[in-house]
Amino acid sequence: MIDKNSIGIQYMQQGKYEEAARIFNEILEQDPNDPIAYINFGNLLAAVGENVRAIAFFNKAIEIDDSLATAYFGAGNTYYNQEDYVKAKDNFEQAVKLGLQEADVYFMLAMCLAQLGQEKLALPYFQRAIELNDLDEEAHFQYGLCLALLEMVDEAIPHFEKTIELNDEHPDAYYNLGVAYAFKDQSEKALEMFENALNIQPDHFLAANGKKNVEEFFRKH
């Protein structure tokens, strides 16, 4: 027997949201206590920006079976999109506690902590996200940012470099590398990085400002 939830997920992945909603509705009509259908419907609602309804569906899934890590993960993402970082963090922590071992959940937990100004607490979660998926450019970039904010510049540089290795069109990674090199008094390298950022994104205000400051430094010395 073909699993209807799988068909609904397939429709979602194809962007056929109405068809997916119809399938999940059918499942819930047949079995109003299918927690997986509630989770999938929650993910669908979140994808179309109906965050409040999405959370209600995730909560319903948790009410039926509070051991489903993916329900907490879905709720966490939705709260994060609403900028409710405390509730998002609580849900991601619960997902991890229930055994969800995916790079995404560790990355999102780290992002919550960073948004809450708890950069030091975020570090091990960024680290774990990268261990689980070393090819995630955004995880490397955000980890680098977090390290840089804590003035751990030498540790941050390899992660900005890795971001560029994975995506050489990442202006913010070049910009932050420029800042790191300026911090280390390596002005020529800093200038090169600011210029790289501006080549990709000519209106990158911060990179333009960084470049101007380094050029002024050269004029004075």
Image: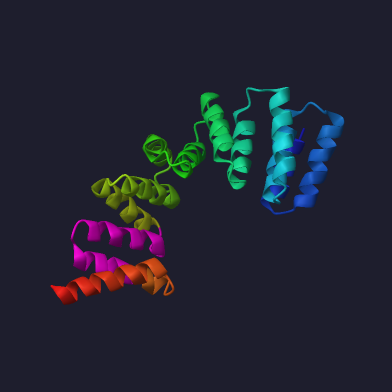
| Residue 110, position as x, y percentages in the image | 45, 39
Q: Quadrant of residue 91?
A: top right
Q: Position of residue 133 (x, y in %)?
A: 43, 42
Q: Is residue 207 visible to the viewer in this orientation of the structure?
A: yes
Residue at image x 73%, y 49%? 11
Quadrant of the image containing the N terminus: top right
Question: Can residue 6 be seen in the rendering of this structure?
Answer: no
Q: Which residue is pictured at 61% across the width and 32% down the height?
A: 72
Name the residue rendered at 51%, 37% in the picture.
105
Residue stretch in magenta: 167-195
> Is 78 left, or right, of 169 in this rendering?
right
Does the magenta portion include 122? no
Where residue 188 sits: x, y (%)?
20, 68
Residue placed farthest to the left in the image?
A: 221
**Along the viewing direction, whichever of 36 and 46 lies nearer the viewer:** 46
The overriding secondary structure of the stretch rendered in magenta is: helix
In this rendering, would 7 be left or right of 125?
A: right
Task: Say which quadrant the C terminus sits in.
Answer: bottom left
Q: Is residue 169 magenta?
A: yes
Q: Residue at x 64, y 32 (%)?
A: 71
| Residue reaching furthest to the bottom | 219
Coordinates of residue 41 in the picture (x, y in percent): 74, 40
Specify the farthest residue to the right. 29
**Relative horizontal placement of residue 152, taking residue 105 as reference (left or right):** left
Compared with 54, 60 (above or below) is above
